[in-house]
Amino acid sequence: MMQTPLLLTQMMDRAEKYFPKKKVISRTESGVQSFTYKEIVERTRRLASALHQLGVQKGDKIGTLAWNHHRHLEAYFAVPCSGAVLHTINFRLSPEHIIYIINHAEDRFLLVDADLVPLLEKIKDKLRNVKGYIIMTDQEKVETSLSPVYFYEDLLTDGDPTYSFIEDLDENTPAGLCYTSATTGNPKGVIYSHRGIFLHSMALGLADTVGMSEKDIAMAVVPMFHVNAWGMPFASMWFGTTQVLPGPYFTPKLLAELIQEYKVTLTAGVPTIWLGLLKEIEENPYDLSSLRGVLCGGSAAPRSMIEAFEQKYNIPFLHAYGMTETSPMALISVSNSSQESLSMEERMDIKAKQGMLVPGLDMKIVGKDGEVKWDGKEMGELALRGPWIASEYYNDDRTGDAFRDGWLYTGDVVTIDEQGYIKIVDRTKDLIKSGGEWISSVDLENSLMAHEAVFEAAVVAIPHEQWQERPIACVVLKDGYQDSVCKETLMEFLRPQFAKWWLPDDILFMKEIPKTSVGKFLKRALRDQVKNHLNKV
Ligand code: AMP
């Protein structure tokens, strides 16, 4: 067979040739705008030529601090298709971490949204390699102390709309770079190659995964800095999928309106986004019947939430699992033909799992006595390998912590059932060890969130003299339940579901649960809050 390189340029070529009239709907600071793929590709060529004029070379890292919008999408292609590397920066990280990753990546230029300029102004003196800042805005001018500064739209006006992308790129050339937060210390970088992104995008199109296609209208709510918005912008461009990019400072109300107005068929985000959307649609009527899939990953989707989407609103739910290191899609829970005769309850049990390994990847689950049995009970650490799994952290001596013998050790403890459906029991570090036995914080959280009064619940371990560790639950109640629900109500609810020693030692009611910059429960901070609280009592 021929050895043709798998490159991102092919995705753009296809959009340009086959889908010039299909749309990218982009919400920016001044409202919603609409572009055709023809316009987007032409603007992408202009951007690439402007970067070339600025002296950007093959291998240079170009950072972005930006929301999900059309300019960010253009950078997704202009940078890698010029042989440079797109470094999408999580602007919600602490200033120290942002400084660290910009310096560690050696970013040469930063593309930044106008509202995020103040963030860079505060740290600019500490950025070692940045040669210039490019402001992405609809406004004519933005006052700033950043220097030298360029305006994105001015660069595009002067750019060449017929610019040709590099044709002799090796498919293993780095295309993207993302940093993932570490438990301790600085974030760790993961490089994505053209080849890896290409094959991951292809996997997003498989009927038994997400099944993305030209017919979809896709809205990535997951930020474009969080593992490339889970690959959706790449696959969408390639397949000619209409894209809705929700832009800055969106609310659940805005998301519901966008889905309704643009008849979004497929959307993706972390569970906190969908909990927010559920609350909105419970309070106000919308027509969301266009949705054929809500893709949810990043942390465990509570079963009660999946049930509400599927049974109350008739919206199919796709529970998936992945990591920054895995591009990210690695597992996905979609039903197969053997489930047709199952009851709704049984099907929901399966949906709540993270699912089967995506075709193209390899996995093993390593327990204390070697690989675990496929019995849905024995626990082990999930290890993965495959063409869109990273093989190392970028210039980082912590590589050996996770990458060994050709495998990525995920740090996630899982079980696998007879059918091959995997369930994430916990992060290794969040699993609670009580009297020598393991308690899954995720299982307890799931059950608590199934109670009608509970909005969110997170369970953490606290040290215990006799039992080593014991679980403590932290609960945020829905509005209107504060007077009628107490600790005993929830204990009563949990008792029939768990062995006695699994039950939390205490249930603390909170106004909110601390979250990470990508909306996951921040268990480290929560543990500290709980310890402080218990010391005071
Ligand atoms: P990140 O690299 O920030 O995307 O985080 C990856 C981690 O998120 C994984 O190692 C898991 O611990 C967790 N995670 C991702 N998806 C899921 C899921 N569907 N259920 C439970 N945990 C998940």
Image (cartoon, helix red, strand yellow):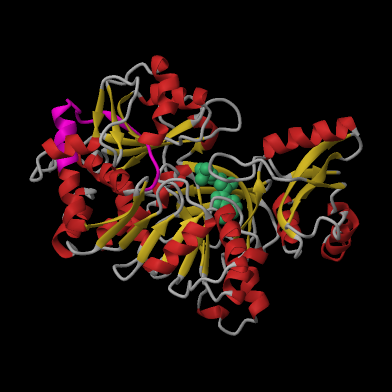
Q: Quadrant of the N terminus?
A: bottom left
- Please report the residue visible at 21 percent of the width from the left and 51 percent of the height from the top: 40
Viewer-closest of 470 and 106: 106
Q: Quadrant of the C terminus?
A: top right
**Residue 204 in which image quadrant:** bottom left
Compared with 508, 15 (above or below) is: below
Indicate left or right for 401 with 500 as reference.
Answer: left
Taking the view exactly as shown, the residue that stands out farthest to the bottom is 341
Viewer-closest of 99 and 166: 99
Indicate left or right for 186 with 132 as reference.
Answer: right
Indicate left or right for 360 with 174 as reference.
Answer: right
Compared with 215, 176 (above or below) is: above
- Please report the residue visible at 25 percent of the width from the left and 40 percent of the height from the top: 80
Measured from the top left, where is residue 425 in percent x and y?
67, 53
Measured from the top left, where is residue 188 in percent x and y?
48, 31
Magenta stretch: give its range: 46-68
Q: Is residue 67 magenta?
A: yes
Compared with 52, 292 (above or below) is: below
Question: Is residue 331 at least partly visible in the picture?
Answer: no
Compared with 123, 173 (above or below) is: below
Number of marks present in the image shown = 0
Measured from the top left, where is residue 146 in percent x and y?
33, 21
Indicate left or right for 405 with 140 as reference.
Answer: right
Measured from the top left, where is residue 190 in percent x and y?
42, 36
